[in-house]
Image: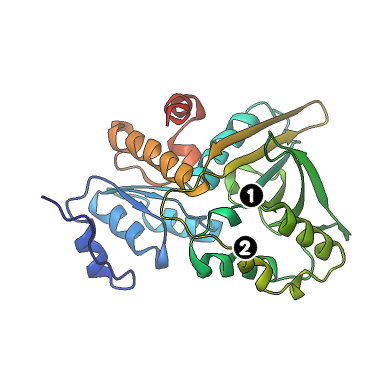
Amino acid sequence: GQPDSVYVDLEDEQSVAEAMAGVDIVVNTVPLNYTAERIALTTGAKLLSLAITEMSAQQGLRNQYLKASGTVVLNAGLAPGVTNLVVNDLVAHDRYWKGRITIAVPLPWNGYRGAEGIRLVHANFTTSGRHGAYSGSHDAVVISFPEPIGDTECIGWSERNDGWVQRLAAGRMVRAYCYIDNRRLNSWIVRLNKRDILGRLPLWPFLRFQRRFDAPTEEPVSIWVSLKTPEFEHSRIITCTGWYLSSAKAAEVMAAQLLNSEHLAGRGCLDSNEAFTLAELAGPLQEC
């Protein structure tokens, strides 16, 4: 039978190509140099990328492979991914293109395995003394998530770009927020951010309560998505259990759709909302 795992050197194109040969569909979480994506586009393969793909890289792949024989779906999974489908469903109501898109996501501190994942979260937070400085003043928001998360203060994030919704924004204002799913640590981050000293936050608070598990995570996850216009405001909350487990399940649903949909063959480089709709995936997503 097929081996459970194979060694792949992501910096070696031949190694990646050999691993992809004869595979029905590739799910990529580490798009280093977009090697796997390029191979899929030129060999007629199907690939699903779960990482956030910068707009410039996405446009570059589109332009370079206009007549691709393969199909690559970018910004798939949970966030990005399902969130994009929800945003796409909401902006359909914004016929005058005046809406503001808001997204708030957790950083799953409770779900990380090992110190490296924790260090990554710490590094992202401490790149600036203060996040969310919109229009010269601090911008934070309190969102009422379902229990057991409840009311949570979130700080602004990705304020200089359109996050992963990118083309969906189409000129609309995008506000992205995040929170740590550990109340004590999140409270520290919010206070330090307001004082413009978040960059000084040491690593030890992130590591102190680190837990190690062999089983999939089961922490509650809530993602808030809204569209506000002068006429109305629509908001939705995506709820699931276990950030990484739910991301894997969302990827499984999208991979099945990509694999079984004949109209997605040879489509080149697509964003997740161009390949899928919320209506066609809602049922399978709720079942998984």
Numbered disc total: 2
Q: Nearer the viewer, residue 243 or 235?
A: 243
Q: Is residue 40 left or right of residue 111?
A: left
Other-residue count near label 2 (Cα within 10 Å), few / some / many at <14 / 14–19 / ≥20: few
Q: Nearer the viewer, residue 266 or 126?
A: 126
Question: Against 174, is 236 above or below?
Answer: above
Label 2 sits on residue: 209
Residue drawn at (81%, 26%) of the image: 231
Residue 281 lies, in percent from the top left, at: 45, 29
Please tell me the numbered disc located at residue 263. Answer: none
Q: Is residue 265 left or right of residue 59?
A: left
Question: Against 265, is 56 above or below?
Answer: below
| Quarter of the image where the C terminus is located | top left
Q: Report helix, strand or loop for mark 1.
A: strand
Q: Nearer the viewer, residue 135 or 217?
A: 217
Q: CA–CA distance between discs 2 and 1?
A: 17 Å
Residue 136 lies, in percent from the top left, at: 88, 61
Residue type at mark 2 is: Phe
Residue type at mark 1 is: Pro
Q: Earlier in the sequence, mark 2 or mark 1?
A: 1
Label 1 sits on residue: 106
Q: Nearer the viewer, residue 239 or 32?
A: 239
Other-residue count near label 1 (Cα within 10 Å), few / some / many at <14 / 14–19 / ≥20: some
Question: Against 205, is 157 above or below?
Answer: above
Q: Is residue 212 left or right of residue 87?
A: left
